[in-house]
Image: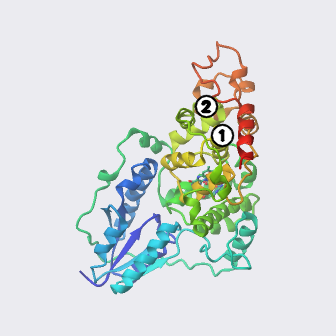
Amino acid sequence: MSKNIGLFWIKDDFRFHKNLALIEATKKHDHVVAFYLYKKHKFLKQEAQRWWVCKSLEDFKKRLDKININLEIIETSSYKSFFEKLFQKKDINIYWNKTYEPDYLKFDNYLSTNFKINQIHFKIFKGNILNEFEEVKKADGTPFKVFTPYWRNAEKFYIEKVPSIQKSISKCKKKLSFFKKTMNLGEISPKNQWSKKFEKYWYPSEENALKNLRAFIKVIENYSNSRNFPSISGTSKLSPYIKHGQIHVETIWEECSKIKRPGVNKFLTEIGWREFNHTLINNFPYMLKGNYSKKFDKFPWVKNQKLLNAWKKGKTGYPIVDAGMRELYSTGWMHNRVRMIVGSFLVKHLLINWMEGEKYFRECLLDYSEANNISGWQWVAGCGADAAPYFRIFNPILQGEKFDKEGLYVKKWVSELKNVPKKFVHKPWELNDEKILKLGKDYPLPIVVHEEARSKALLAFKKI
Ligand SMILES: Cc1cc2nc3c(=O)[nH]c(=O)nc-3n(C[C@H](O)[C@H](O)[C@H](O)COP(=O)(O)OP(=O)(O)OC[C@H]3O[C@@H](n4cnc5c(N)ncnc54)[C@H](O)[C@@H]3O)c2cc1C
């Protein structure tokens, strides 16, 4: 095998633009092979992720083909066993971008040591983040735990940095195969009917990510307000593209910085929350396995499979909660305001441990990200850094009436309520008209009573 072969390890990097590892590989080598490591057990409980990844591989393969790069999919039980074999090859160069999860970063250290020992040329690049998480620290060198001062510093730091220079990807001389045993996309694509539904809503590609960003920027001036209303397209819906690296957050920053419109700052602040969450899980990795705030270790969570299933299926009897859970199941995505409402309902009305919600979101979300999901759930539960206080309990009726006044969102996802007048759409139990709705038959009665649940939650909170 030629010394001049460059390997590019694809993780969450399905893009050409600002893909530093791929750019370097094509600049330095006449022949490049891209490879994706497929861990079957990782996807067993993450079918939504599997769907997005397979579609992304399909699109990316076509684009790489055009520049003479073969994309090879390799099944492996663990990254370690795969790389142990790769260390034996002396004639390769390998490149990849960082993934900001503690296990990946730890693994990067292991790889660095072993590639060095085996005298294999390798280079690791900055991944999909504005600032490396170690770069933004308090004056005393410790990590920030509160978002606002963090973002004030992080934003300034990013702006003052020399912007990364974008070199373009070169076409390779000839397409080559490198790995002996590779897989076809057909072998790894999900076979179930559930994920087929996503095709109606999403097309995972870099081109689409950029198109969506530009379309969103045209209406960004209303973002600060419209982002709260789930029945309108008030947010960018870029999260799955960002998660899988179809778009780099620097590109979002640059496109937004070109315009001076209201809404831009608020939008970039949300990107800031993503940055903050990544710094949190890397500075406090114990929060990946439990509560950031240790006092919550004693919280008297309730184990109740029946209530948990009703929540998952969108059958709690609270329309805004049910609409959110059904939107999630149907589209692999849920509006942020509604994520907060359904999350609060699970942990405060049902007193079910946030980890159950985190697990279910992990299974269903196309944008599932360890940093954002764990931090999002701990924010909702009140046990995270800079979290919503536990005693602030969302009232699902008032939330519905405020953010879905006309009931359009609820009616879209909970078709049983389509004929319910808007006055009752968030509290159908007050309707009392069996010709329109038979409660308990067409649509469930509330599984808990709001006021009682609220009192119980406050009592439980007092115990810690
Ligand atoms: C319980 C819970 C779980 C969540 N799980 C995830 C998850 O697994 N993956 C995920 O990407 N987001 C998660 N979020 C954050 C947020 O809900 C989504 O990022 C957002 O709804 C995505 O929609 P959008 O792209 O239209 O967002 P926009 O409003 O257009 O925001 C642009 C981008 O900023 C980032 N962003 C926006 N809001 C947040 C936030 N609150 N925290 C962190 N980043 C944010 C996302 O990357 C998003 O794509 C979670 C929130 C909660 C409350």
Q: Which mark is residue 429?
A: none
Q: Residues within 10 Å of mark 2 (few under 14, many from 20)?
A: many
| Front residue of 142 and 265 | 142
How far from the left and from the top, in percent, is residue 363?
48, 47
Name the residue carrying label 2. 316
How far from the left and from the top, in percent, is residue 442?
57, 20
Give the residue displayed 65% in from the left and 58% down from the top.
Answer: 294
Q: Quadrant of ligand 1?
A: bottom right
Left or right of residue 190, residue 149 in this image: right
Tag 1 and tag 2, C-beta contact below 8 Å: yes
| Front residue of 56 and 435 | 435
Task: Name the N-terminal-most of marks 1 and 2.
Answer: 2
How far from the left and from the top, in percent, is residue 33?
33, 72
Left or right of residue 121, residue 400 in this image: right
Give the residue displayed 43% in from the left and 40% down from the top.
Answer: 194
130 above or below 202?
Answer: below
Q: CA distance from mark 1 to mark 2?
A: 10 Å
Q: Secondary structure at mark 1?
A: helix
Q: Label 2 sits on what residue type?
A: Thr
327 above or below 164?
Answer: above
Disc 1 residue lies near ligand 1 with CB under 8 A: no
339 above or below 260?
Answer: above
Q: Label 1 sits on what residue type?
A: Phe
Q: Secondary structure at mark 2?
A: loop
Name the residue carrying label 1. 345
Q: Residues within 10 Å of mark 1 (few under 14, many from 20)?
A: many
